[in-house]
Amino acid sequence: MEKGKKVKAIVLGIVLMNTAVCFAQNRAIPDAVIEELSSLLDQEKGRSAVLLIEERVIPYLGEEVRIRTVKDFETWRLVALGYFYKRDLTTTIRYCKAILNQLPTVLDNGGEVDPQKVYSVRNLLGVSYVFTNEVDLGLLQFEQQVEFIKGANFEIEDSYLGKAFSHMGYGYLLKKDYETAAFYLNKAKLYCKVENGISSDGCYGLYNKYLADYYNAIQEYGKAEEVHEELLALISEKGNAGVSKTEVARLFTNAGHSYYYKGDLNKAITFFKHSYELKNTLEESASTTGISLAAALSAAGRFEEARYYLRKGLEDYNFQATQHPFEALSVDDQKVLIGLYFMAKNEQASYDAGLGEEHLYLAAAYREYSVAILERMGEQIVEKSSARYLLDRFYYIFEEAINTRYVLYEQTDSLHHLEAAFQYAARSKTMRIREVQQREALEYTLPKALIERQQGLRSRFVQLENQQYDAGGQNEKLGAAIRKAKEEYYAYIDSLRTAFPQAASLWEAPEPPSLEDVQQGLKARGQGLLQYFIGYQYVFSFIFDGASATLTKAPLPEQLPERVDRFRSSIYQWALDPAAERLEVYTTEANWLYETFIAPLEGQLSQRLIIIPDNVLSYVPFEALLKEKPAAEAPLAAYPYLLKSFQFSYAYSPYMLLPIQRSKRRQKGKVLAYAPLFSPVGEEVEDMAARQRQFGALLANEKEAAAIQGYFPTELRTGEQASAARFLEEASGYQVLHLATHAKANDSKGDFSFLCFSELPGDTSGVQNRIYARDLYDIDLSADLVVLSACETGIGEFSRGEGVISLSNAFAKAGAKSLVTTLWRISDEAAAIIMEAFYANLKDGQPKDLALHNAKLAYWAQSDDQGHHPFFWAAFVPQGDMRPLSLSRPLFPFLLYGILGAIFVLLGVNYMKKRNQAHATH
């Protein structure tokens, strides 16, 4: 065949093949197939339904959702439901989103779709989001669902609303927001009656299931038990009327959980076994119940029985202990995570019971699998706050992994196990690192216009949420606008993920630093490292310097949060009331913290020390701790502060010792200093809310900012120039940012901590001059240093896995390499003195931590005895990269000066040459 004919034949073949595919995808599915699929789903036979879908439905429809008619909608709805019953939630989400996106096409073509079936798709999507830990996306879906239900005029609207509120209650329960969870469960109770159905598909059964989960979460196990007993009694009374065997099995499982949490292991085992046996007579997998049964058996010391159910469950999940253990999983990752966790726990308990060291090594292997799949789950989550809740919920996975390696380290004295434990502690804090890395990498992956569009859409709903927060959260019109803005944002994120699949890899955190990496970094910096990991049971301390490494373990001290709070309160309240009682509290708690967290380790600590705190220790300025409790009459200058013994700096995680990709943006080698103007608080203002919005004048902030000009090139913003809008516009262009202003921490919702800027004329709301922490996340700073000389900028909401969600945390996420932040409301005048000395020391080339340390000592030297109280100097803490500050200079002036210099040299040489020639002639 000639070459031209071959090409025509190939083209014709492709056309015919595509035509055949299109024809196959547009063939009508036989009604009998749809009826069979519907029947299987009515019986909740997810596996058979999906088998039917893949063998006899998808060949007609194709893999991609295409909806033009009502029948298309109904068919794809059944397909999504089938994958949901199979618990393939990722596929369920993909299909539900496509169905809802294409639904307008059906309506535009004149199709009439049953609102109850639209509701079912929305419900599937919301539940699937929640069950895959995309909690915020799920809550958004249920908020929209409430609006949809109210507009659809369902005959049994109460039941639908009750289900939506029940799901919302469960979502907030996962976020550990128990107050809001109780609020929505109470709303659900108003709509959910016994006659609405006692199965989990019925409003009453669903509400009670989540109510029992709520009671278990707040450790009121007796109340959870009562809820399950009532449901089981109702089933018995009605003779299983309207309740399937599948549903009875689930109720048995839920009851087993309540008895397990209560500690009644015999009853828990009985109920789990009833459920397991019943599920084995049905199509539904019994593996999840088997793992719950194994947990109870293991707790009862029946390790071999537990091992049987755990192995069987993990085999059913298609988990394989190979190089790629998660490639072929048949269920969502969370089920596998729980199975792996209990497998590791059973092996560790076997070792503790004296059954052999091999069980400890098996426990270590399963711990690694548990951490790996938890990290995988975090990388797949779109919404940052949902990733935060996931880490908080499963933080115990890291504690158990560290503990297993600690036991092996104690047994073998091998640094291999110490390093593994240290890396688990580092991996527990990858969330901020991943976000910073993603921000930097996106510059090199996505076009600038797309990044700006993403940031603009996010900024839109963030600003609306800020307004809602300022309004007290009660504005329904704002609530609707927020939901719409979020929907647009998440739709855009979906489109980016589809168009740029390679960007998904940017969520992956870098490998944690090795022991060798850390020690080399410490040696180069001349520092030591003390990292704490505070779990639910233990405090682990990692102590490193350039040559040695140690790991210690201690029980979690009782009342640690309360004692840290008393320590801090006694410091900053002393400034208002310098009573002897406050000094007594301070000296007691400061010495207790020293004896608990420093004294046992002191012989191994470097004098210049990086501290990576954890949990409430993030609120502690270690230099204010006391080596011993001074006498009541002792002058403050004689107190044995750790300021006299150590030079502290702080870090979020050991990843700071690794190089991070720098932004492409070139910044001005200058300091941008803001000193906003504030009015005095007026006594004539009677409205309490208005008075609270006023922070009062700062008397020395402009002096503080202006003093920097004596040491570094500085652009100063004061008065109306120091506005919030201007700061957001220009902050990314400078190497150093200095803010001498007011700030307000929020320890319950850290994202709503805010900085204050100059009050704007005509701003009666008092909020247009604020920048919230969450406003900073999308600014690309890459600043070498940010100084937050404002109140409480290091204080906020604590989140396991992320640390303190505060203004300093927000600047770090935005790309700041180092920060100086504050832990309480500082003295305006003391701040001005310390900051001027700090910049003078930076000018002399001192590392940032040494510059701040020496500035505090200088303040100490010139103060009276009251000035030696830690209120005045201990609030400032340095974080991040402590290397000396080096302000880059713009390249053009140096080139210009160099060129001009060269020209003058050449002219001079030429002049001298001619002059010498002239002299020779004469």
Image (tube, rainbow, N blue to C red):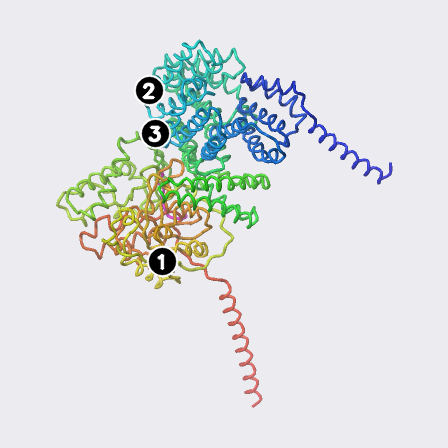
Q: Which quadrant, please, contains the C terminus?
A: bottom right
Query: Which circle's residue, 3 or 2, is located before the other in the chain?
Result: 2
Q: Amino acid at mark 1?
A: Pro
Q: Amino acid at mark 3?
A: Tyr
Between tags 3 and 1, which lies in front? 1
User: Does residue 839 sit above or below 921 in this rendering?
Assistant: above
Instruction: Find the magenta span and give its range.
Output: 524-531
Residue at the image position 14 percent from the left and 44 percent from the top = 580
Q: Residues under labels 3 and 1: Cα distance?
A: 50 Å
Kindly state the secondary structure of the residue where label 1 is placed: loop
The residue positioned farthest toward the right in the image shown? 1
Q: Is residue 141 left or right of residue 54?
A: left
Residue 371 located within the stretch drawn in magenta: no
Residue 35 lies, in percent from the top left, at: 62, 18
Q: Which residue is mark 3?
A: 536
Q: Which residue is mark 2?
A: 223
Q: Could you say which is closer to the camera, residue 494 or residue 346?
A: 494
**Residue 737 appears in the figure:** yes
User: Does residue 435 sit above or below 273 in this rendering?
Assistant: below
Residue at the image position 54 percent from the left and 84 percent from the top = 915
Q: Amino acid at mark 2?
A: Lys
Between tags 3 and 2, which lies in front? 2
